Each structure stands twice: as C-alpha cells, then as structure tokens.
C-alpha cells in the first residue's frame, strides 16, 4: 500500500483476535474440568484439519461451481493472472458457478492452494473495471490469508456448538444422574458460542474492509469496486427510468410511489454496502490528494 | 420524517402534502461550491446554463408572478450578464433557461427566480432546478437536479436515448454528499429526458 494504512481498522482487528483468543483459553480451561483436555484437542484437531483441507471443495460444491481452464474463459483467466502479478501472488484456480446471483468468493488454505470463484450472474452484470475490482477484492482475501484466519477463529464456535449438541444428547433432560457438570458445560458452551459468534462476525467484517482496501490498492481504482458493490446489491436497479414530469402528473392523483416498509424506515439501518462504498470513496479521495 | 410520510400516505394526504410542501430556495446556494467540486474532483465543467422547471396555472395572478420573475431576471441581466429565455417542453412544462459562463451568477439567478415564485405563493408549482455539466474527455453530460418536492438534490447522467449511467450517478452522489443535500432514496432520482437525444432537458 502506498497510502497511509488504516490503523483504526488494524487496531480493532487485533483487539477482536485477542478477545477471541482470550475467550478460547477460558473456554478450554472450563471445559477441561469436565471432558479432559485430550478429548478437546482431538476434536479440535480433526475439525480444524477437515475445515482446512476441504473448505475450498466444500465451498465450490455448495455453490455448484466447477473449475474452468483458460480456453473456456480466456478473459477471466487473463484478468486474474494480471491482478496476481500486481499483487505478487501465485495464480489461483479459477471456478465459475452457474447461477444468476452475482457473487464471488475466494477459498483455499494458503496462497499456493487457492481458488477464486465467480458466478455467471457476476460476469453478466459487471463491466470490465467493476469485475476487476471484485476479483482484486477476492485476491486480497487470499493475500491476507483470510481463510486461515477465519478457520482458526471459527474453531471455537464450531466446537462450542458441538458441545452444546452433544451436551443435550447425553446430558440435559430430566433424569440426570450426576449430570450437573454436563449442564454447566452446556450452559458455558452456549454462552461461549454466542459471544464468539458475535466476535467472529465483527472480525469477518473487518477482514472484509481490509480486503476492500487491499483490492483497491491492487487495481488503484477504489470507485470501480464501489460501483460493483452498488450493482450487486441491486441499488442501481432502483433508479427510475420514468420522467420526473410524467411522474408528477401521476402524483397529483395517486399516492406517492411505494415506500419501503414502515418498520424498515423507522429502524432504518445503514447496510454494510453503504459503509463499504463510503470507505472506498475516502480511499479514492486520498489517492486524488497525493 | 419517515413516520410522518408513512402516516400521511396511509391517511391519503400524501399527494396533497407533497404538492404543497414548502420549497426552500436557499438550498440552491449549495450549488456554488458544488460547481467547484464537480470540476476539481470529477473533471465536469459547467455547461454555462441552468434552468428552472415549473408547471403553469391558468390565472392572471400566476401570469403576473411569471412577469415578476422575468422583470427581476431582466434587471439582473444588466448586472451579471446572465441571459434568460422562456421555453415550453413537450410535456407541457415551462422553463426559465439561464445562460452565463459564471456558475456563481447562474446560481444567483436561479435562486432569484425560484424565490420570486415562492414569494408570490407559487412554490408548489416549482418542479425542479437543473444545473448542467459536461466532461470534455468523453463528452459525457451530467446534471444536478434539485427537486422542490423532495427538497433534495440528485444526479442525472443521460447517455444516448433514454439510457442513464447509474455508475456515474452513484459516484457523483457519493462525491457531493455532504456538500449538497443528496436524495438518499434513489427511487426518487427521476430522469428529465431531453425532448431530443443529445439536447439538454430544457431544450
């Protein structure tokens, strides 16, 4: 990156990871009194390995995506290749999912073993610059080793969740025989799971912002990604085509155009897309000033 | 605001309230700095024209109000060199079209005209004030539209015949947001299509 890094973002990320780690320690400490450390380690290890090695295959499978080679999608391959050079990354596998929903993701356990997947819908709705912006965002995920980070971060909630289910199966219920310990374990793991879920969501949001910044650094064009985000979120489609003068004639006799839900307006939240676009705009402004 | 709107439309007063909402011509002064930003950050230079769009009322009093507007603009012409003409478009709406190479004078004149309508009690007849821009490098035209119904600005970038460039519009909106009161619900970004392709909305 050639402009000043976002230290606030980095600070929050470090803090979140620290909290997750602290929580993890507490969790293991409490749980080991009931289950024994060895059991935990085994379960954790199996899960993490599974996630680690099969995450990309799982992700591709769930999206119905398949790997494509350069003669099927020459342009897509060329673009990704060029962006990888720019980002100093080995070229990942390229996959395409046959769905109209515009989306993209990166999967894989390391920079060497990664796959970038886009959907047909994404290729259809985005122009060249916008597509580059999205691909660079996904490559930034690979560069930041986000799959590994998020896998490690989600161990805990996965395990906690398993313990909850396992606890209900073998512990809970009315005829407990010395099952008090299990009940405590279940309660603890439930709380742990909820807290870790919230933290992981925060961490994932920060990684998303970081990938936005990284992607913009790769292409040097933050507004292209911003425009892609607006297109994907469907906000572009909301812009009317009907002339103001026509619409005013109608409005003299009919009710105003349909508004978004009453509740939605009262509790209007800013969708993350807006914040991401906002930040990309700021980056573009920083680049302008240099 | 949102709550009131919903209630109003639920009770069936929406159209009425929308048509009688008090327009605030002071908002138009926001364009003075917007002109600078448009050129400095986006390479959009002023086209040297802006216009006020209104619907007519068939009464002598309204005709008198329009005469007032014209008298004020004629007086201004000697001061600032801002020329003006009247125009009626294919939709039956009326325009006061102002031309001046100095955007500052354009904003002042549009404000004068709008303010006079409001003073005479015809604020509700004002539809929009439109400020034109063009970018030499790709011959792209862009407009900032101030809607008197909504009391907010929105961007309009027409391309070809009845096509608009949403990407550029969102970019304009995000760059000028804060400087102008930008309409945040893009479902109100109604286009003002020119009567003939390649023309301005007021031609």
Image: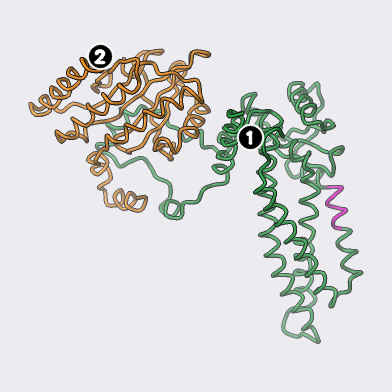
Magenta region, main secondary structure:
helix
Q: Colour of chain B?
A: orange
User: Which residue corresponds to mark 2?
Assistant: B83
**Residue A188 visible to the viewer:** yes
Residue at (89, 58) in percent of width and height: A46
Which of these two is toward me, A142 or A47?
A: A142
Total numbered badges shown on the rendered structure: 2
Residue sitting at the far left: B60
Q: Is residue B164 above or below residue A188?
A: above
The image shows residue B119 at horizontal and vertical percentages of 16, 34
User: Which residue corresponds to mark 1?
Assistant: A100
Which of these two is toward me, A74 or A204?
A: A204
Relative placement, left or right, of A62 versus B31 is: right
Residue A50, magenta (yes or no): yes
The picture quadrant where one finds residue A136 is top right
Mark 2–mark 1 distance (CA, rounded to whole Å): 52 Å
The image shows residue B60 at horizontal and vertical percentages of 7, 26
Image quadrant containing the N terminus of chain A:
top right
The picture quadrant where one finds residue B98 is top left
The image shows residue A237 at horizontal and vertical percentages of 50, 33
Q: Which of the chains bears the disc numbered 1?
A: A
**Magenta segment range?**
A47-54
Relative placement, left or right, of B31 versus A106 is: left
Which of these two is toward me, A3 or A213?
A: A3
Q: Which chain is green?
A: A
The secondary element bearing badge 2 is classed as strand
Q: Is residue A222 above or below residue B9?
A: above
**Residue A135 visible to the viewer:** no
The image shows residue B40 at horizontal and vertical percentages of 49, 24
Q: Is residue A23 above or below residue A183?
A: above
Q: Residues within 10 Å of mark 1 (few under 14, many from 20)?
A: few
The secondary element bearing badge 1 is classed as loop
């Amino acid at each position: 990156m050639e402009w000043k890094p976002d230290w606030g973002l980095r600070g929050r990320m470090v803090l979140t990871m620290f909290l997750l780690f602290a929580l993890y320690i507490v969790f293991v400490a409490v749980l080991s009194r009931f289950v024994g450390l060895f059991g935990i380690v085994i379960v954790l290890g199996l899960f993490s390995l599974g996630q680690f090695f099969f995450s990309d295959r799982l992700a591709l499978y769930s999206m119905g995506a398949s790997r494509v080679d350069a003669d099927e999608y020459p342009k897509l391959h060329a673009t990704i290749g060029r962006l990888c050079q720019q980002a100093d990354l080995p070229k990942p596998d390229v996959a395409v999912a046959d769905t109209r929903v515009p989306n993209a993701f990166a999967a894989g356990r390391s920079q060497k073993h990664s796959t970038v997947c886009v959907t047909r819908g994404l290729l259809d709705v985005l122009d060249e610059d916008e597509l580059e912006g999205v691909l660079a965002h996904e490559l930034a995920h690979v560069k930041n080793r986000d799959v590994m980070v998020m896998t490690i971060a989600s161990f805990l909630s996965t395990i906690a969740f398993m313990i909850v289910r396992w606890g209900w199966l073998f512990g809970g219920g009315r005829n407990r025989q010395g099952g008090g310990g299990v009940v405590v374990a279940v309660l603890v793991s439930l709380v742990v799971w909820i807290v870790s879920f919230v933290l992981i969501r925060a961490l994932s949001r920060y990684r998303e912002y970081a990938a936005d910044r990284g992607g913009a650094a790769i292409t040097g064009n933050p507004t292209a990604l911003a425009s892609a985000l607006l297109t994907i979120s469907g906000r572009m489609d909301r812009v009317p085509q009907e002339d103001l003068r026509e619409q005013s004639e109608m409005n003299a006799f009919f009710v105003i155009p349909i508004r978004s839900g009453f509740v939605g307006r009262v509790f209007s939240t800013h969708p993350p897309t807006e914040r991401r676009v906002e930040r990309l705009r700021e980056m573009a402004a920083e680049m302008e000033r240099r | 605001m949102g709550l009131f709107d919903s209630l109003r439309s639920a009770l069936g007063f929406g159209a009425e309230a929308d048509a009688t909402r008090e327009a605030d011509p002071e908002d138009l002064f926001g364009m003075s700095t917007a002109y600078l930003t448009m050129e400095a950050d986006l390479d959009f230079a002023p086209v040297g024209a802006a216009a006020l769009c209104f619907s007519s009322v068939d009464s002598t009093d309204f005709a008198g109000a329009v005469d007032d507007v014209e008298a004020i603009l004629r007086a201004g012409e000697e001061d600032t060199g801002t020329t003006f003409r009247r125009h009626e478009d294919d939709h039956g709406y009326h325009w006061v079209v102002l031309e001046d190479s100095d955007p500052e004078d354009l904003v002042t004149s549009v404000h004068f005209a709008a303010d006079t309508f409001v003073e005479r009690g015809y604020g509700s007849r004002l539809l929009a004030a439109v400020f034109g821009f063009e970018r030499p490098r790709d011959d792209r035209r862009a407009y900032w539209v101030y809607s008197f119904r909504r009391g907010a600005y929105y961007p309009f970038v027409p391309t070809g015949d009845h096509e608009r460039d949403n990407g550029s519009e969102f970019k304009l909106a995000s760059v000028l947001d804060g400087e102008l009161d930008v309409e945040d619900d893009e479902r109100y970004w109604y286009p003002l299509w020119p009567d003939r392709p390649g023309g301005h909305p007021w031609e």
